[in-house]
Image (cartoon, rainbow, N blue to C red):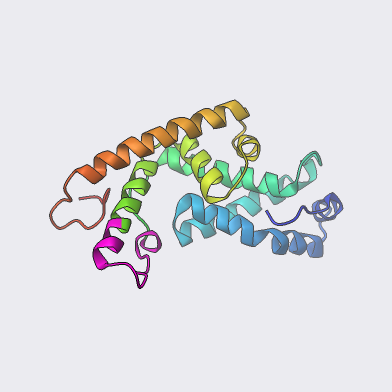
Amino acid sequence: MAQALAWDIVKRAAQGDVNARRQLVEATIDDLWRLAMRLTRREDDADTIVQETYARVFEVLDRLEPTGKFEGYLARTATNLVLHRWRRKRPTAQVAETLTAAAVEPWQTVADAEDGRRRLAAVWAAIQELEPQPRAAVLLFYAQNESCEAVGRILDVPVGTVKTWLQRSRNHVRQRAETLLRSPPALGSTQIGEPR
């Protein structure tokens, strides 16, 4: 997240200072929403995750230890909420419209653009097949540009586990996407991994 907040603001917010709470939200909401959006791929789910994250963190604000960055607590809480949702209900492998609606560049043919969309859809479908924690690690590392250490802190696992998940996930996504791309598209289906 953009810049580390001073723990004195967190301490004031824990004591009930409304302005300090407003400062915390204003300083972190954009990055938190982007993280939630990357993990959930849906605006309404991202909004819900952000609200639940702030509610949970503000409940325990007075018990937070000033050992790390406040933003890390937010990211960890949001990630745990998303992981909990994933465990409850495994999402269908749908490709978000924003992923597949890439603009055609002047030098591309329509066939090139369609090929690119199909490849992206195959990769996204393969990512959706990953277990919740490795999927979260992949999204945090590749989509949020978090370091392996930061991903480990957020998911509460050793760095070695994160690296193992990333390696295995890369192999799974590569193999699965190649398999999906070799299979002919189903009649009436324009997206790989779209529920039929």
On screen, residue 15 versus residue 191, left or right, reads right
Location of residue 63 with respect to 14 vertically, above or below: above
Relative depth, front residue between 24 and 138: 138
Residue farthest to the front? 107
Between 106 and 64, which is closer to the camera in this rendering? 106
Q: Hey, which quadrant is residue 114 in on the image?
A: bottom left
Residue 40 visible to the viewer: yes
Task: Tell me the quarter of the picture where residue 127 sits.
Answer: top left
Q: Where residue 116 appears, x then y in whole percent?
A: 32, 57
Query: In front here: 141 or 90?
Result: 141
Residue extending furthest toward the left: 187
Q: Is residue 47 left or right of residue 122?
A: right
* Residue 90 shows in the view: no
Residue 102 lies in the magenta-colored region = yes
Look at the image and give the residue range highlighted in magenta: 97-115
As drawn, 174 above or below 71: above
Q: Is residue 120 magenta?
A: no
- Give the x, y percent position of residue 27: 72, 61
User: Residue 5: x, y in percent?
Assistant: 79, 54
Of 79 and 126, nearer the camera is: 126
Residue at screen point 32% across, 67% down: 108
Q: Residue at x 47, y 52 (%)?
A: 40
- Residue at (49, 34) in percent of width and height: 166
Say which residue appears at 36% left-offset and 46% top-offset: 123
Residue 39 x/y as whole percent: 49, 49
What count of labels does the image hold? Answer: 0
